[in-house]
Image (tube, rainbow, N blue to C red):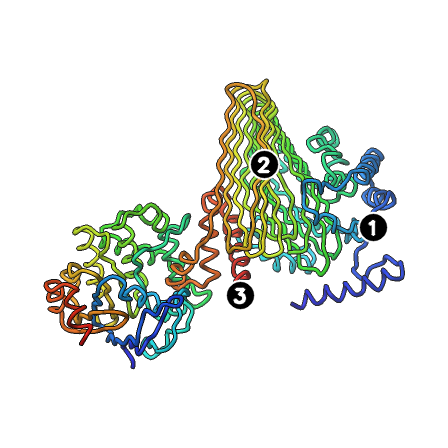
Amino acid sequence: MPDHLVIKNLNASIGDRPILKDFCLTIPKGEVHAIMGPNGTGKSTLAKVLAGHPDYTVHSGSALLDGQELLGQEPDAIARAGLFLAFQYPSEIPGVTIANFIRAAIVARQAKGAPFDAKAYYSELYAKMDALKMDRKFTARFVNEGFSGGEKKRCEILQLMMLKPKYAVLDETDSGLDIDALRIVSEGVNALRGPDTGFVVITHYQRLLEYIVPDRVHIMWDGRIVHSGGKELALELEEKGYDWVKTELASA
Amino acid sequence: MAEIDDNLAQREAIEVDRSKGDFKYEENYAFDAGVGLSAATVDYIAKVKGEEEWIREFRQKSLKIFQDMPMPTHWATADLENIKFEDIRYYLSKGQKPVRTWEEVPDDVKKTFERLGIPESERKFLAGVEAQFDSEAVYSRMKEELEKLGVIFCGPTEGLRDHPEIFRKWFGKVIPIGDNKFAALNSAVFSGGSFIYIPKGVKVAQPLQAYFRINAENFGQFERTLIIADEGSEVTYMEGCTAPKFETATLHSAVVELVALKGAKIQYITVQNWSANVFNLVTKRGVAEEDAEVRWIDCNIGSRLTMKYPGVVLRGKRARGEVLSIALANDGQHQDTGAKMIHAADDTTSNIIAKSISVGEGRSTYRGLVHIPKTLSNCRNNTECDALLINEHSRTDTYPAISVRGRKNSVQHEASVSKVSAEQIFYMMQRGLSEGEAMSLAVNGFVNDLVKEFPMEYSVELKRLIELQMEGSVG
């Protein structure tokens, strides 16, 4: 299906432990879908399996990005196909500046030997940093090294804005953020919303969804989606708590 | 590819000739000392070069010392035993005189420069380059303004013949013949290299450059460099080394002596990328007189075995010595590198920063020597060794030897070992970088703070070499 990220009957495990169990989800381009659920239910695993993390084993199923199979591809090929993962715990890369890192990521998407427009790159980078209220000095800092939790997440969103993927998976982007940082990060995501991008927002709390208002909310339990609804589902979940999921939805 | 095939064809021709005991090779070298090392080989080299008797005697004495000294395998790797000295050819020359313009350079040499991938930005420096094609400089042109300043930039033969009053005093003095077995070998058979004299107070703005390479198989390269910076002068010298890949091992054994007189500054930069079968055994040492500074920047990529420990003898008050080194050991390679700082006057300071990267089955070893005797005061040394391991089979060892005595002397030593983690690689690949690109970015990040000290063209070249190494290292 063009313009959709379609995940069908995905089964994946880490070691001997099955985590995703016949997981199905379809995200149309242009929409924001939230996945909520208690800890240990497989939300982050979903993000990593889609991105091709080598620690996970995929047993069956498919994940088609605009019709292109992602499963079984190398992480860099998946990224270049248009899937971006904003990490819950981004890695530090000592000695590599943010400006050089994002530049390398952009060059990796260009045809080999194509010229790189450094002037246009920096003016775009600075504009996006301004939008995220990041100091210009940030470009010279090493990727995630010595960053606060909020700075790490802002840096993830900066990369997202610069790389303009077809689909973005935000894994617990709200964790470790104070309310100001949460607002800034959300504004960054909202600025990217539009017909060309689909979002999967993974979160434990409803709070983030006050700022990034989803088109659909899915509740995940034990490796699969057990309930879907509109944005009001997040509020209902907040009110009734995850016990509700356990006792009513999971058994349904 | 075609050129490599040519070389293989030549190799076969060589082997046929050797079985007949006939040492005339298909390669069109005008002068060839044949295979193996004897007093006759040394005499041949001295004769071809038209050297004075004292140089011939120096060579013969060196040969004797080389033959008498044992291999240093009591501390160094046993791989040294695999050097077949009797199979090596010690002198080859096409007989060219150094030429002065780029147009006069033979086409095959130009092609070699192209294959070496010397960036355009560096070709513009070629006007000031001494390039060594096997034994002799075939291309040499000194900029007119340097000549006017009285700077001498020539090979050892010309230096010792035309300017003995300058060079003879220091030749073989910073590194005596018997310093080590390979310094003795070089002293016996040296040819090519750079002899440089910077007159008092002259500050050479542009770096002087030289490219060295080995062209013929089984051919040892023994260049000899002596740089004398007279009082208050400054010079930067840069060398790059590349060898095409041959089937059998090749030996490179250079001697580099630096003399920084009162208040002078010498910076010596090496970016070396030997092919994986080269034994690279080099002795480099500088003397820094009062208020003088000697700085070695040394990048070792490639080779089968590199043993190299640039040193500075801090002989005058307030002299400064520095070694910044980067070593990258890939599969089957051993980078055994380090630094020596000998403090021999009060108020002297030295700084060593060594970074090594071990990839796959690669092995890197750091050996450091810092010596501050108790008679001195107010001497300082700072040593930092950082090792980066990429995958679990690689190996790194550190052997620092620090002897600091006396009051008011201080030494600081830091060492670290880090790894490129699978999570880091995944993170970078998630941004679209291939595994090789991710690794080379991590490696470039690791050496980043050192590379900032390098001149622009060399940091670009180093980055490119690291990329080539890392891309070749992932399956």
Q: Kindly indicate whether the residues beneath marks 3 and 2 are on one polypeptide chain.
A: yes
Instruction: Please give the name of the residue rendered at 49% of the width and 31% of the height, measured from the top-left corner.
Output: B412
Mark 3 and mark 2: Cα distance apart in space: 34 Å
The crowding category of the residue bearing disc 1, from other C-alpha atoms within 10 Å (few below 14, some 14 to 19, many at least 20), is: some
Q: What secondary structure is found at the residue carrying circle 3? A: loop
Query: What is the crowding at mark 3: few (fewer than 14 residues within 10 Å), some, or many (at least 20)?
Result: few
Q: Looking at the figure, which quarter contains the N terminus of chain A?
A: bottom left
The quadrant where residue B268 appears: top right
- Compute the Cα span from label 2 to label 1: 34 Å
**Drawn side of residue B468 relative to residue A70, left or right:** right
Q: Which mark is residue B36?
A: 1
At label 3, which amino acid type do we have? Gly
Chain label for disc 1: B
> Residue at label 2?
B368
Question: What amino acid is at disc 1?
Answer: Gly
Give the foreground label among 2 and 1: 2
Disc with the residue nearer the chain's start (3 vs 2) = 2
- The percent coordinates of residue B165 (x first, y second) are 73, 29
Point out the tag, 2 or 1, that comes first from the N-terminus.
1
Q: Is residue B324 above or below residue A227?
A: above
Quadrant assignment for the C terminus of chain A: bottom left
- Foreground pick, B398 / B296: B398
What's the chain of the residue with tag 3? B
Mark 2: secondary structure = strand
User: In the rendered image, which quarter is residue B325 located in?
Assistant: top right
For residue B325, above or below residue B169: below
Name the residue at 84% across, 64% down: B16
Residue type at mark 2? Answer: Gly
Marks 3 and 1 close (CB-CB < 8 Å): no
Q: Secondary structure at mark 1?
A: loop
Disc 3 target residue:
B475
